[in-house]
Amino acid sequence: MALLHLALAAAVLWASAFSLPAQEPAARSVELRFVPAVGEGTVSLGIYDASGRLVRVLADEWTFNRFRVGLDGLSTTWDGLDQAGQPVPAGTYAARGFIVGDVDIRGEAFHFNDWIEAADSPRIEAVAARQLLPGGDILLAARLAGAQGALVRYSPESDVRWHMLVQRPRPQPAQSARLAVSDTLAFILLDGEMQAARLEDGAEVSLPMPVSGVKAIAARGQQLAVLDGEGLRFYALPDFSPRGSAGQLPPGLGSVALLDDGAVAAAEDGSVWLWQNGWRRLDVPAEVKVRAVSGGAGRTFWALQELAGGLLSVAQYSPEEGRLAEWSPGPQDGKLTAVAGAVERDYFVASLELPGVQRTVAIRRKEGGGGWEFVFDKKITASARFGWANNGLVPESEELPEELKVPLAENPLDPAAPASLVLRATADQTGTGLSTTDGLPLLRVSDEGRFGRVMLMPGTTPDTARFFQGDGACVEEYTLSRLGEIMSFDAGSIELTETGEATPPPIEEPESE
């Protein structure tokens, strides 16, 4: 960008008694003209007071066609107001800025969240509950960045990964969440309140039974089971017609699953109970306490079981044959917190917790019964306080570099123009990008205002940089190239009085066509 040669055209506008209140100051208008030293790019132009403080941003990444075109180059107008819309005091002001050339912004990676695979992936901060669907898709009750709750369907083995069913504001995350799915409906239990939505399109479904104070839910095919303080009741879907109740409940039931021809439930003491025209306690190994159950294929069910010493594992059970199979995480894999099984094959999804990490794994039996295989393994690492440490990006650090010195392109119209510039990473409600250290915006990276933390690091060459932005769900990384195509220009000084420009420039005729 070029140095602008600044000819100031001042038109003094006095308020008349018939147009403006007498106590308001007269409007001041200063015309700024400049000749770009290059033929393309975006222009950022600011007004600075005598101390060098930026008082007004006149152009924020404007293209050339946003300026007026005249014989002496480009021009725009300053109204004598500061950034807050207040008149500035009389004095000497400077107009200067930068032309940003063909800087390249390229997305590189999403860090600390395996669910976010592409720019259009839901911004999942945490998974509250998960449930396997027929065919192998996974239904997630999730919290998204921006205080949103969502019900989303994930297809791990499809080119189209995501289908959003429900998304709505939720200021506070649920303390507890459970999911159940029938052939056509999804049921979600959030802090004892039950809701339902169609799997096809996410449309809310009205429930004809009490929806508050619910302890557990289970669904399978065209059946629904609801456990609350009144008992365990069964319904036929899709019309929710009552199909009886489970009679006198064993004490302390907190988890329930439907089988092809009955139900199983886990109690607080670790016991497991089968319902088939009455309750019967199932035999499990003496050292096992079952903490939760989920339906499996046929008459099998999956159990989150606690072993001696507090170790947790996932086991598959049959009411008649006992424990059929078991999967145990390794010492470094995390603590099991939930399990949900598929009803048509030996396949389950489980949640594990590590310090600062939430992990969701989907595991199925290998063809031919030869052990287990991972379908996917997704981790979310808390990264709201990401930063730099030990020469790398880390999910939490007090070291957050935000400034970087880069060389500037030579301005042939201004030999005194600076040869370098310190860039600063910025984030506000309008988006993220780069600015000067005094706040003049230069380059936008994102137009979304959800990013609360940004970081700027050197790239592989002096005119490149690595830009990081985080919204609590993940950290995005970008490479910024050709930063050396930024050019400084000086548009001159302005002597501003209480009424306008002290020495207005001559009026310029517009460029003839």
Image (cartoon, rainbow, N blue to C red):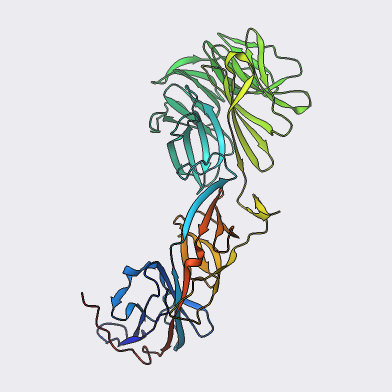
Question: Is the N terminus in the top left, top right, bottom left or bottom right quadrant?
Answer: bottom left
Q: Is residue 144 above or below residue 51?
A: above
Residue 502 picture quarter:
bottom left
Residue 473 seen in render: no
Q: Residue furthest right?
A: 309
For image coordinates 47% across by 77% down, the residue present is 55
Work out which residue is located at the far left of the displayed protein and give it: 513
User: Which one is nearer the viewer's eye here, 380 or 207?
Assistant: 380
Where residue 440 appears, x then y in whole percent?
Answer: 48, 71
Residue 381 image offset from top left, x and y in percent: 62, 43
Report the front residue among 175 and 361: 361
Where is residue 422 shown, x and y percent of the image? Answer: 57, 70
The answer to whether residue 2 is above or below residue 162 is: below
Q: Residue at x 49, y 83 (%)?
A: 49
Q: How many numbered discs? A: 0
Question: Residue furthest toward the bottom?
Answer: 503
Q: Which image quadrant for residue 513?
A: bottom left
Tell me which residue sits at (32%, 69%) in the image. 66
Placement of 143 over or under 375, stated as above or below: below
Q: Position of residue 231 (x, y in %)?
A: 55, 21
Q: Which quadrant holds residue 100?
A: bottom left
User: In this image, 157 relative to 401: left or right?
Assistant: left
Relative horizontal placement of residue 249, taking residue 212 as reference (left or right): right
Residue beneath the point at 57% across and 39% down: 114
Residue 88 can be seen in this image: yes
